[in-house]
Image (tube, rainbow, N blue to C red):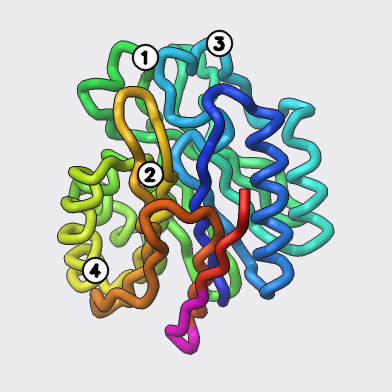
Amino acid sequence: MKIAVAQTRPVKGDIPFNIEKHKKLIQLAISQGAESIFFPELSLTGYEPPLAKSLATNQDGKLFDQFQVLSDTNKILIGLGMPNNANAGVRISMIIFQPGKPRQTYSKQQLHDDELPYFVSGDTQVLLSIGDEVIAPAICYESLQISHAETVNQLGGDIYVASVAKSQKGIDKAMIHYPEVARKFSMTVLMANSVGPCDDFVSVGKSSVWTKKGILAGQMNENEEGILIFDTQTYLSIIIPITS
């Protein structure tokens, strides 16, 4: 299976602009035969907690119909970052589109203390199957907690996809933690990070993939937009940058 992670430079709060960039990257992944593509944390709005309440929606919004069409037409799974309205408040979520299937939403279950004034946590782990592979999404902070990886491993996850918005400090932690997760649980690990300003920090890219043995198999740089595609059969990866 070819699985892609996207590295994007979102424009703060500009959903229409960010949607067009997402579509460009999805089409690029399709052209390379990818069967799935995952985007960074809150990729459609940018990671901007103070704006989340005003921008939040849900998976059935008409705004997302175009992504369902892309998924259905091209047989590709798509995971997008978006704040999501829930009964208890706003969640940090990934809206998931699968060919010929109802949409799903995965919401971050473990929040950082800084997020608590703006968000409520999710309560259900989503697992996604493509052929014999089982993909488990994780969103930023929780992906650095070993308990989350342990849970998805026990649930049968083969591939761990971390959708993040990380500063240099966060990336330094990730470069130690993710290969350890890969080795301990024999899971392929991918990280999709953004680049550029986010809230009160700068996101520094370095979207990456590690094999089940914890070997770094591909990594983007700190400022380019584009996609990283990993082939789970050959263990080969390719990086395709785009111009803004």
Q: Please, what secondary structure does the residue beneath circle 4 have?
A: helix
Residue drawn at x 17%, y 66% is: 180
Circle on res. 164 = 2
Kind of residue at badge 2: Val
Q: Position of residue 167 (x, y in %)?
A: 27, 41
Task: Name the magenta segment's main secondary structure.
Answer: loop
* Residue extending farthest bottom: 234
Q: Position of residue 67 (x, y in %)?
A: 74, 44
Please tell me which of labels 1 and 2 falls first in the chain. Answer: 1
Please tell me which of labels 4 and 2 falls first in the chain. Answer: 2
Q: Is residue 98 magenta?
A: no
Q: CA distance from mark 1 to mark 4?
A: 32 Å
Residue drawn at x 36%, y 77% is: 217
Q: In the rendered view, tell whether residue 47 sits above or below residue 4.
A: above
Magenta highlight range = 233-238
Circle on res. 131 = none
Q: CA distance from mark 4 to mark 2?
A: 20 Å
Residue 151 is left or right of residue 104, and the answer is: left
According to the picture, the residue beneath numbered tag 1 turns out to be 118
Q: CA distance from mark 3 to mark 4?
A: 39 Å
Identify the image quadrant of the N terminus: bottom right
Task: Work out whether residue 157 can be spotted.
Answer: no
Looking at the rendered structure, the number of numbered marks drawn on it comes to 4
Please tell me which residue lies in front, 23 or 82.
23
Please tell me which residue lies in front, 192 or 212.
192
According to the picture, the residue beneath numbered tag 3 turns out to be 54
